[in-house]
Amino acid sequence: MRPSILSRVALAALAISIATGIRQSSTFAQGNTNVPALVQPMLPPSARTATNEAATIDFEFQGAPISAILEWYSRLAERSIISAPNMAGIINFRSYAKLTKKEGLQALDSVLAINNIAAIPLGDKFLKVVPIPSAKQEGIPFGQQVSPADTLGTQIIQLKYADAADVIPALQPYLHAYGQLMALVKSNSILITETAGNLRQMLEIIAYVDQPSALRWRCVPIFCPTPRPLT
């Protein structure tokens, strides 16, 4: 019986020491004021700028030439302008509220679009400025459009259920004069060249009409007359 008693005493002593250690650790954590607090992760500079971007930009163009708009565009986009030689126009535009950089670029895109001018990104450092009718031949952005509302771009939309040729008439009223709709029959897709704002509206229409057709079954009773014997 002696080993059993010794074992119990050893286990009791071990439990007491563990409990004492836990209480001391708890007391130290409560009384120690030098324990470092949790540090919130810092956002990278680009993320902080995007999250807390201040509205500090305002515009006032009274009879200004296109070159004045392009100079502002170049500053905000941080890109050099490559402009076609036939860019002309008189701009009257004033912002009545302070704008962020993103909002300022969107406003300038709209001002240029009203004057039939498109600014097309060329690499990471340049903007090619051309008349909108010729923009389709100048490498406008292709794919998912996340640009300001009046930035010109091209996207291919593949349909699952509806026929591309049937959907195009529903989109035609929302197309600018310089836009383009083309049915790609073999892939049942639609090629759209439009401003980002109109393109988003067209995508909503496509999502609404490109739905599976509900099959409705109707049972029609068929009455067969009782055959009569031949006389």
Image (cartoon, rainbow, N blue to C red):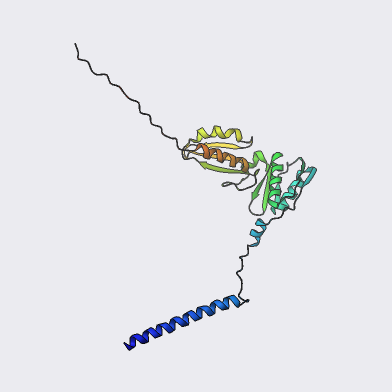
List x then y, in percent, for residue 216.
41, 32
State whether residue 167 is above or below residue 122: above
Q: In front: 111, or 102?
A: 102
Quarter of the rendering occupied by the C terminus: top left
Classify residue 180 as left or right of residue 223.
right
Q: Residue furthest right?
A: 62
Classify residue 20 as left or right of residue 79.
left
- The reply to whether residue 79 is in sight is no
Classify residue 93 as left or right of residue 3.
right
* Residue at image coords 79%, 46%: 60
Quarter of the rendering occupied by the N terminus: bottom left
List x then y, in percent, for residue 230.
19, 13
* Residue at image coords 35%, 28%: 219
- The reply to whether residue 209 is in sight is yes
Q: Residue furthest bottom?
A: 2
State whether residue 18 is above or below residue 194: below
Q: In front: 218, or 162?
A: 218
Q: In front: 54, or 136?
A: 54
Q: In front: 6, or 225?
A: 6
List x then y, in percent, for residue 116.
69, 39
List x then y, in percent, for residue 16.
46, 82
Q: How many marks?
A: 0
